Image: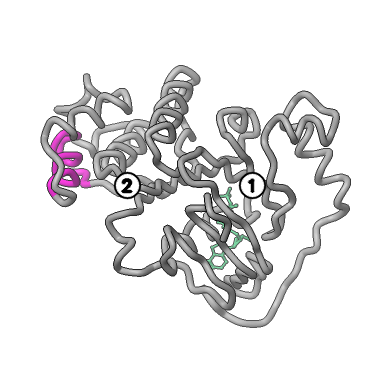
Amino acid sequence: MTEAAAISTRELTVRRGRRMVLDGLNLDVEAGAVTGLLGPSGSGKTTLIRAVVGTQIVRSGQVTVLGEPAGSPALRHRIGYVTQSPSIYADLTVTRNVRYFASLYGRSGAAADSAIEAVGLRSHRSRLAGNLSGGQSSRVSLACALVAEPEVLLLDEPTVGLDPVLRADLWDRFADLARNGTTLLVSSHVMEEADHCATLLLLREGRLLAHVTPTGLRRRTGRERLDEAFLQLIRETGPADDTEARGEDR
Ligand SMILES: Nc1ncnc2c1ncn2[C@@H]1O[C@H](COP(=O)(O)OP(=O)(O)OP(=O)(O)O)[C@@H](O)[C@H]1O
């Protein structure tokens, strides 16, 4: 693990069903920065995030977070994880949901209100979560994670289903958090969003294709558009190796 890394994996191997999902992955995620985890659907982004949280069965290798092995009880209050599907209470209002999480982490009602504001749900704060749209529910989930003020925030596709204005606001919010020392690992399969990240981890078929800055990726490929740059990298590395392996880890 390098000195500035908040998250490190060494030779991380994960199989799900018969598939080798992560294949000897070595990577470092810089502390106090926004790192984008990008890759095609099925490339292993969610699996990697689950391994960092400690909820993924790992076949071999190490995952270290803030100097502790992933999944350690000591990390529980230091990591926030927002899954792709919102995990909130449908029968509670937006405010009640966020205040509940605030109370779990010893935060005030004012902190809950500010998290609601940050995700653009102020005018919906008295609505039942069950009556919200998909994008709005995701934002409640995000507010519940934000209110805990974790040192490491893992966000799995947090901008899916959001309009461009909200998306831009959220990326600004992530940048603010990083400036204040939070480590963010944000997955996306939208390469346009990569420009909001200080560095990019590009995954393909469970392998790290590149660990670069957006500028570095442009320079390396000679492409201005990041989606084209990523495609170029994929072409350079040849066809995907569709590894199937026996074993039923989940
Ligand atoms: N519960 C499971 N059992 C078996 N295989 C699984 C399971 N969940 C995911 N996989 C497989 O693991 C691989 C990686 O999945 P993962 O969800 O990590 O990808 P991803 O990059 O997050 O994809 P997406 O962008 O579509 O969310 C895929 O091939 C998927 O089919």
Question: Element type at marker 2?
Answer: loop
Magenta-drawn segment:
89-103
| Residue sitting at x 78%, y 34% | 229
Q: Quadrant of residue 115?
A: top left
Assess disc 1: are there few (<14), some (14-19) or many (≥20) residues with their C-alpha within 10 Å of its C-alpha.
many
Q: Residue furthest front?
A: 3
The kind of secondary structure the magenta stretch mainly shows is helix
Question: Element type at marker 1?
Answer: strand
In the rendered image, is residue 229 in sight?
yes
| Residue sitting at x 64%, y 47% | 201
Assess disc 2: are there few (<14), some (14-19) or many (≥20) residues with their C-alpha within 10 Å of its C-alpha.
many
Residue nearer the viewer, 176 or 89: 176
Mark 1 = which residue? 201
Image location of residue 44, percent across then percent down: 60, 57
The kind of residue on which mark 1 rests is Leu
Q: How is the image coloured?
A: one colour
User: Could you tell which of marks 2 and 1 lies nearer the N-terminus?
Assistant: 2
Residue nearer the viewer, 115 or 11: 11
Q: Quadrant of residue 21?
A: bottom right
- CA–CA distance in space, label 2 to label 1: 22 Å
Q: For the N terminus, which image quadrant?
A: bottom right
Image location of residue 141, percent across then percent down: 31, 41
Asked whether the beta carbons under mark 2 and mark 1 sit within 8 Å of each other, the answer is no
Mark 2 = which residue? 150
Image location of residue 37, percent across then percent down: 58, 45
| Residue sitting at x 54%, y 71% | 62
